Image: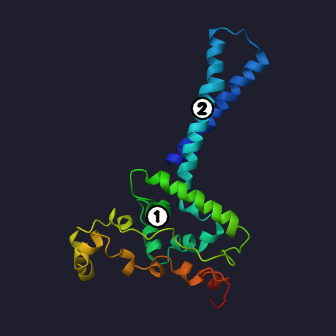
Amino acid sequence: MFRIETLEQLLKATALIASVISIVILVWYLARRPPLGRTTKVLLLFGLGIMPLGVALTGNIAGFEYTLKREFCGSCHVMLPYTEDAADPASTSLAAVHSRNHSFGEESCYTCHADYQLFGAMTTKVNGLKHLFYYVTEYANTGPYGEGGKPIHMYKPFQNTMCTRCHSTTPPTWLASEDHAGMLEDLRAENAKCTDCHSGDKIHPRAFAHGGNGRPPVAAAEKKGEQP
């Protein structure tokens, strides 16, 4: 029996049920052609209005929920060096370590890169449309790992708030690090960056080894017995 375990699955099931109800009502009306009494009008209101609106609403929300998943991010082949490493249980990169966190692991790309502000979800999705535009115009015809395309770069510097929303800079275990304690005020004021020490090649090492230079990332080369 199909089990609903996530919000996305619940929304998909709701959209499916609403669409079936709408179809049943419309088929019933077209087949029977009953008089347009109160009962028939109420049923048609559900079949032509309420149920289709429910399908549209739940379907769009389910689609939004899917865009939060790492699987969605990896659907663009230029992201494979990033997402394959993040999903690798043997990888020790920061992306992989964070992706193994059960609280947000399946949504690690979105959690770590979404704008952390009042309209963060909205601005993140607007930037996502920019990603889609550049993918279609610059990377759609590149190799399976984006070979032949331009090196990928971030739109703007990675802000410390993207890290400190989870790593609050206050726990004793965090402050026990001399580097953390010595840079505390600068980190909180954004005068120093978390990524100054935890740099990109430690977060996404396969992607940085790849570098958009026309060859597959290290992991893919290793699987084929090639020299990366």
> Mark 2 falls on what kind of element?
helix
Residue 138, given in percent of the width and then of the height, sits at 68, 69
As drawn, 5 above or below 112? above
| Quadrant of residue 92 within the rendered picture | bottom left
- Quarter of the N terminus within the rendering: top right
State if disc 1 and disc 2 touch (CB < 8 Å).
Answer: no
Amino acid type of disc 2?
Leu
Judge from the rendering whether residue 111 lies leftward or rightward of residue 132; answer left or right.
left
As drawn, 189 above or below 206? above
- Quarter of the C terminus within the rendering: bottom right
Residue 129, given in percent of the width and then of the height, sits at 59, 57
Tell which of 180 and 225 is nearer to you: 180
Residue 191, given in percent of the width and then of the height, sits at 31, 74
> Mark 1 falls on what kind of element?
helix
Instruction: Give how far apart the Cα atoms at labels 2 and 1 are.
Output: 32 Å
Q: Nearer the viewer, mark 2 or mark 1?
A: 1
Q: Can residue 127 be seen?
A: yes
Q: Which mark is residue 21?
A: none
Residue at coordinates 56% horizontally, 38% vertically from top-left? 57
Q: Which mark is residue 113?
A: 1
| Quadrant of residue 222 within the rendered picture | bottom right
Judge from the rendering whether residue 133 lies leftward or rightward of residue 189; answer left or right.
right
As drawn, 212 above or below 66? below
Give the farthest residue toward the bottom. Answer: 227
Residue indicated by mark 2: 53
Tell which of 204 and 123 is nearer to you: 123
Residue at coordinates 64% horizontally, 61% vertically from top-left? 133
Residue at coordinates 77% horizontally, 20% vertically from top-left? 30
Q: Can residue 14 be seen?
A: no
Amino acid type of disc 1?
His
